[in-house]
Image (tube, rainbow, N blue to C red):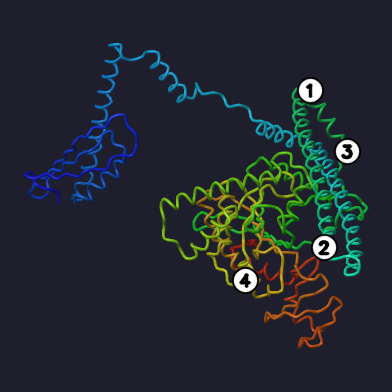
Amino acid sequence: MASTQDSNSAATMKKSKGKVNSTAEKEFVFEFRAGKHNCVLKVPLQFPVQENISDLHGRLMLLHKIPCYIENDLKTYLSNFIERETILDYDREAELSLQRLTTGDGDVNQLTNAWTRSYVETTLEHARPEEPCWDEDFADVYHELIHSPASDTLLNLEHNYFVSISELISERDMEIKKLQERQATEMDKVMHELGNTLSDQDVNAVASQHFDTQQVLENKWASELKQVTGIQKHEYQEWVISLHQDLQKSNSSQITEEIKVQPSQLLELEDSGARMFEEQPQLEESFTIHLGAQLKTMHNLRLVRADVLDFCKHRRHGSGGAKLRRLQTALSLYSSSLCGLVLLVDNRVNSYSGIKREFATVAKECTDFHFPFLEAQLDEVQQVLLYARAQRSSKQKEQPEIPRNGGDDKNKNVERNPSNILPGEFYISRHSNLSEVHVVFHLCVDDNVRSGNITARDPAIMGLRNILKVCCTHDITTVTVPLLLVHDMSEEMTIPWCLKRAELVFKCVKGFMMEMASWDGGISRTVQFLVPKKQENDPHILLIVPVSGRPHCTEEGGRSNSNSPHNPNKRSAYTAGLLECGSIESISEEMFYQLSNMLPQIFRVSSTLTLTSKH
């Protein structure tokens, strides 16, 4: 309780760290009645008051044990006191300034210049117009042309550029292959003479020479490809701007006719041998679900068996749907219906190995006319990552916190390699040159995803949640997620492993999608669950996984190991566990349909309503 009228209570408030011209201490006096006692609260305050009034009021209530029924009166009186005294201080300073101006102590020109600058900087009508941005202007022009009859011409030109780059890449691969074959022959001869006329030093010298020669050749082709793609991008952008200007100046109907009669370069060829690669059979199932407690939102789900890079590759001689996919990607490039893909990568931000190298190869097959090349985007990500690590490290030094479980190991890893990302973190790359994808989420995972004991709190799962949140805030309405959190199968991934992992991802994604209503207000989206198609094993081995989860192998011709207790002739008992190997597929149709049957059991699938009439 505060003191009575005979005794006063005072509390010294902390001075603000903000810089002010002048400070003055004033005493706040508040009188109130508590029972039979008349109480007075006296608090010295520093003006101008820099702290929040609500926080100051709460501290006074707590420190002086003010009764709760006085709370509103104290807050109102305190607010009025601070406002009144602040206005009086401003008026006093204004009077002193005017007095200095009338006596000639102040510089009138300097004062008017300061007022003018402040007014111009804070008033919208006097603000400088934004300078035109080439990227934004080109984006507006392209968006207008791709939604006009000129779209067919744009696609034809892009495809011609793609074919020229593909031919150049084929020449590069052929020349590198010939060099490797020639070097292999030379190395065989050297190894044959090892110990006779040549020593280990001679072998190392030849190997070093081969490496240097191959590096020179690869750098030569990389420089040529970079130069060609740069020229293509510059020519394409200038041509698009020129075409847009011609459409505005000339007769639009005449230009439309000229555009329509140009031959299309994306028609399907009858000769199947001319295809870059044959399309492999793709399994997929589609579902429509409704999620939400009260206000339900409809979403589309797809279960697809395909290679992750199939969503990125263009076909030089595409099928009938290749042009439609290319057109759909172009139409939605500058829209609120973007398509995203989750790519599982390691902790290094580069494109030197593994799936990252394969993705970079696909991205280089076609020139990106709208966004920086992949290498430039990765360099920018690397710089941002280093800056973020430095900022986080400085904050942790200023405000040390008690580390959580495993926090020490993570901090040590970051300190050891500040340029690497942690599991669950991801970086984003933008593309306009991929088949069905605009945005790629490079999600960092470690070897733990191949074990069977991950939980809903695993960094990879939490990374998926953050990715879905980015999709909601950045108009990405279609996202492709690897269902098993791997891009290729291996022998330890048995049927129980696949079913357990699929159930975990299904349930977690369902929970994340229910959170979407609070993130974006309930917008319908499409989530594609991708089942891996590629396998690490020998393409001549068939992996049969029984229900017990203990695999045994058979050769491609059906001959089984004589020591195996399983009878290879009774394949029907293991049909559900057959993982078909090789370059075509790794998950059998039976396994795919088991996953397909699991999905509607976890999600609420919309069922059709059958109406019958009674006669």
Q: Amino acid at mark 3?
A: Pro
The answer to whether mark 4 and mark 2 are in CB contact below 8 A is no
Residue that appears at 41% across and 57% down: 401
Q: Is residue 12 left or right of residue 486?
A: left
How far apart are the two marked residues, 4 and 2, measured between alpha carbons? 44 Å
Q: Amino acid at mark 2?
A: Gln
Under tag 2, what secondary structure? helix
Quadrant where the image shows the C terminus = bottom right
Residue on which disc 1 sits: 250
Q: Amino acid at mark 1?
A: Ser
Q: Which mark is residue 451?
A: 4
Q: Earlier in the sequence, mark 3 or mark 1?
A: 1
Residue on which disc 2 sits: 201
Closer to the observer: label 3 or label 2?
A: 2
Q: Nearer the viewer, residue 609 or 92?
A: 92
Mark 2, Cα crowd under 10 Å, few <14 / some 14-19 / many 20+, is few
Q: Nearer the viewer, residue 430 or 258?
A: 430
Mark 1, Cα crowd under 10 Å, few <14 / some 14-19 / many 20+, is few
Under tag 1, what secondary structure? loop
Residue that appears at 26% across and 19% down: 96
Placement of 587 over or under 417, stated as above or below: below
The answer to whether mark 4 and mark 1 are in CB contact below 8 A is no
In which quarter of the view is residue 308 placed?
Answer: bottom right
Q: Earlier in the sequence, mark 1 or mark 2?
A: 2
Return the x and y of residue 147 as percentages of the image width and height: 73, 36
Q: Earlier in the sequence, mark 4 or mark 3?
A: 3
Residue on which disc 3 sits: 263
The answer to whether mark 3 and mark 1 are in CB contact below 8 A is no
Residue that appears at 92% across and 55% down: 273
Mark 4, Cα crowd under 10 Å, few <14 / some 14-19 / many 20+, is few
Q: Earlier in the sequence, mark 4 or mark 2?
A: 2
